[in-house]
Image: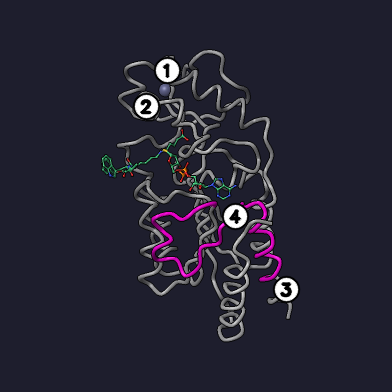
Amino acid sequence: MTFEKSNLDNSIKIIQNLMRKKKAVKFVAITGSGISKGSGIPTFRGKDGLWKNYNAMDLATPQAFKRNPQLVWEWYAWRIDIISSKKPNSAHYALVDLQKKNLLNYIITQNVDSLHFRSGSKNLLEVHGNIFRTRCENCGKLSLLTETPKEPPICDCGTMVRPDVVWFGETLDQKIITKAYEIISSECDVLLVIGTSGIVYPIAEFPFIAKSHGALILEFNLEKTPISRIADFTIIGKSEEMVPIFVEKIINEKAY
Ligand code: BJW
Ligand code: ZN
C-alpha cells in the first residue's frame, strides 16, 4: 500500500489517547469529491477532473444557466447518468460504521452525488445541494428526478427548473450553513477532512474554524492541500483504503 503509514498510526494513537481521557469524543467529517473517486465519479480539479475538459464558468454559475440552460442541463444529465450507475465505496461505509458507534456526529459533504445518503449515513448536511433534486426559481418548488432528463425539466408553473445545486457566486442555504458552522465550532473534537482540495469557500475555511476551537484535524487525501498546513495529520493515500483502516482501529478502541 502506498500511504504514509506512520502518519496513520500516529494519528490513531493520539485519538486513542484522547478517547481514554475524554468520555465522548465527537467526530465530524467534511467530505469532497475525492471520497467518491473510488466509486468511479470524477473529481472537479486535477488531471482527470471535470474542469480539465469543461469550463466551470460556462456550466456552474447562474449566469451560465441564464445564457445557455440547454447546455447546462446536458452537462448535468451526463453527470446524473454517471452517478446513477455508481455505488458508495468503502470510505462512505466506514463513516456509516463510525456513526453506528455514536462516534461520528455529522457529515458535512460538498458532494451532490447522494452517495453518503445511499450508504445509509445519518446527520448529513449536503451543503452544495443534490444533483437529483430540481428547483423552480419561479415558484420555489423542489422535485426529485426519477430518471435522467432528456430535455430540461419544466415545473408545473411552466418555468424551466434548475439543478438544486450551489453554483459559483451563489450563497449556500442559510439554515444548512448556519448549522454547519455551529457543529464545526462547538460539536467537534476531531475533524476528518476527506478528499477535498480545500479551495472552495466557505467550506474551505471550516478546518481553520474547527482548529481555532481546539479540534484535532485529520486530512485524508492523495496529496497535500492548503488544509495540510494546519492539519495535525495528513494521511496521504486513497480515502477508500485509508478511511476504513482508520475507522476500524477507532471502533476497536471504543470497544476496549
Ligand atoms: C482523493 C482521491 C481519493 C482524489 N482519495 N482523495 C474570488 C472570486 C470569485 C469568487 C470567489 C473568490 N474567492 C472566493 C470566492 C467564492 C467561491 C470560491 O470559493 N471560489 C474559489 C474557487 C476561489 N465560492 C462560492 O462562490 C460559493 N459561494 C459563496 O462563497 O457565496 C458567497 C460569495 C459569493 C460570491 C463571491 C464571494 C462570496 C459557492 C461555491 C459553490 C461550489 N460549487 C461546486 C459545484 C456544485 C454543483 C455541481 O456539482 O455541479 O461545488 S464547484 C465544485 O467545487 C463542487 C465541489 O463541491 C467544490 C469543491 O470541490 P472538491 O470536492 O474539493 O473537489 P476537487 O476536485 O477540488 O478536489 C478533489 C480532492 O480529492 C483533491 O484534493 C484530490 O487530491 C482528492 N482525491 N481522489 C482521497 N481516491
Ligand atoms: Zn415552478
Q: Which residue is mark 4?
A: 237
Which label's residue is closer to the chain start, 3 or 1?
1
| Mark 2 Cβ and ligand 2 under 8 Å apart | yes
Distance in Å between CA atoms under marks 3 and 4: 22 Å
- Pointers 2 and 1 in contact (CB under 8 A)? no
Give above or below for 72 relative to 94.
Answer: above
Distance in Å between CA atoms under marks 2 and 4: 41 Å
Q: Nearer the viewer, mark 4 or mark 1?
A: 4
Label 2 secondary element: loop
- Amino acid type, callout 1: Met
Distance in Å between CA atoms under marks 3 and 2: 48 Å
| Mark 1 Cβ and ligand 2 under 8 Å apart | no
Distance in Å between CA atoms under marks 2 and 1: 8 Å
Q: Which residue is mark 3?
A: 252
- Pointers 3 and 2 in contact (CB under 8 A)? no
Q: Is residue 23 left or right of residue 72?
A: right
Q: Is residue 247 left or right of residue 68?
A: right
- Pointers 2 and 4 in contact (CB under 8 A)? no
| Mark 4 Cβ and ligand 1 under 8 Å apart | yes
The quadrant holding residue 101 is bottom right
Residue shown at 56% from the left, 38% from the top? 113
Give above or below for 17 relative to 240.
Answer: below
> Which of the numbered marks, if any, corresponds to residue 137?
2
Label 1 secondary element: loop
> In which of the image's four quarters is ligand 2 placed?
top left
Which label's residue is closer to the chain start, 2 or 4?
2
